[in-house]
Image: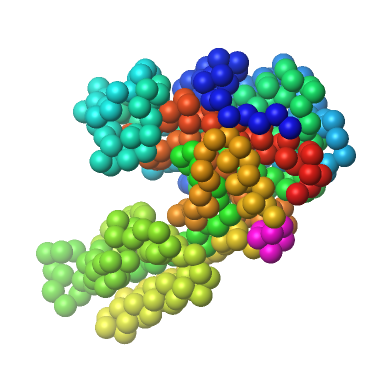
Amino acid sequence: MQPFDDPRRLLDETSLVERFLRYVVVDTTSDPRSDSRPTTPGQRVLLEQLAQELRLLGLTEVSLDENGYLLAALPGNCDAPPLGLMAHVDTAPAFSGANIRPVIHEGYTGGEIRLAAGVTIDPESSPELRQCLGDTIITSDGNTLLGADDKAGVAVIFAALELLLRHPELPRPPLRIAFTPDEEIGRGTNWFPLERFGADVAFTLDGGFPGEVNVETFSADSAFVTIHGVATHPGTAKNKLVNAVAWMARFLDRLPALDRPEHTEGREGFIHIDEIEGNSARVKVHMILRDFEDDLLAARGELVRRLAAELQAEEPRLKVEVEIVKSYRNMRVMQQLRPTLLGTLMKAVRLAGVEPEAVPVRGGTDGSRLTEKGLPTPNLFAGGVNFHGPTEWVSTRAMALSVCAVMNLLQIWAEEANP
């Protein structure tokens, strides 16, 4: 085995950074209101671009299906079973991903990074910066997110493929590559062609600072509460109007204040008020429910139902509807399916010269639902920080460390024949 532990060398030997800069400028924001597959045309634009790049590298079985799943294969040179590498191409709709202008900050010397739009990134809010002195940092200009989640992962996979093709002597298993759409809105695996993918185990390259490996995620549900009031002209509303907006305000105020994401961390779950729409006659709120334990997640759903029922009892003229929709479940079940996966990941990261840390994801990945479907899919860092907003950034050295870890992982898998 040839350990990879020199990220500077990989930055010189691959087109990692050039690819990343090329990918982030394509607007691939996903849209939860769309029924298209993918939900936005920009995602297919990038997927078609990636398909062409895979063919140019010489990969086989390159296919982009009608649902926006791009698959490819690279034959192995050993008897190990197939291994998958995955990343998603969409960016989160929480902040603009249109007209991204990446800004390169070479030789970071510490302190604040000031962007043109008045946005600042500093070590107080981003302590990871303290580990990046001397690095090249990439940000947006402050008007958009950057898209390191997950185009850093896309670029990392391509850089690893470049190295594998340049060094055919390195042991590698048969590889299955997948780039997916709409992960950020929870649809990343809805129509994933699992049988055609053909891997025994897969790894997502999806965000995270160097050293982070993930074999746990939140379990997640969505809660929709709709309140129908009684509409009437406000000038003659006395004893007639039942204002849905006012009653929804009461409902939201009764949710536990400290149970919101801005007050939680670590293994604490939350109820997040995500979106609200309507008027005095009808108002609907969407909340996301999160916890690492399924019973605690269910309790949050029951709390929503109980508060809604209490509201209905207080004002019988209201009509209050509650719908709880399953999103995904904690992927830690993979530790039962494949108990050695965490150790394999940690070994690959340690060989890259980074101390690994198993961190539970306060969110979900494509791996959450793929694991539930029977394909164990843990996550490996790709280098990004501060996702889904204008302070998102990535160190080029951090991305290169991810490539190192991937190269180590593939060799371990090949030599230990399905560890």
- The stretch of residues the image draws in magenta is 334-339
The answer to which of 55 and 176 lies nearer the viewer is: 176
Q: Residue 329 vs residue 397: left or right?
A: right
Q: Residue 43 vs residue 362: left or right?
A: right
Q: Which color scheme does this rendered protein use? A: rainbow
The image quadrant that residue 65 belongs to is: top right
The image quadrant that residue 181 belongs to is: top right
Magenta stretch: includes residue 47: no
Please, which residue is most extreme toward the bottom here?
313
Q: Position of residue 310 (x, y in %)?
A: 32, 82
Q: Quadrant of the N terminus?
A: top right
Depicted 21 relative to depicted 249: above or below? above
Depicted 88 relative to depicted 247: above or below? above
Q: Residue at x 29, y 23 (%)?
A: 109
Residue 264 seen:
yes
Q: Position of residue 35 (x, y in %)?
A: 56, 45
Q: Residue at x 35, y 19 (%)?
A: 107
Q: Residue 174 vs residue 369: left or right?
A: right
The answer to which of 320 and 350 lies nearer the viewer is: 350
Q: Residue at x 52, y 38 (%)?
A: 354
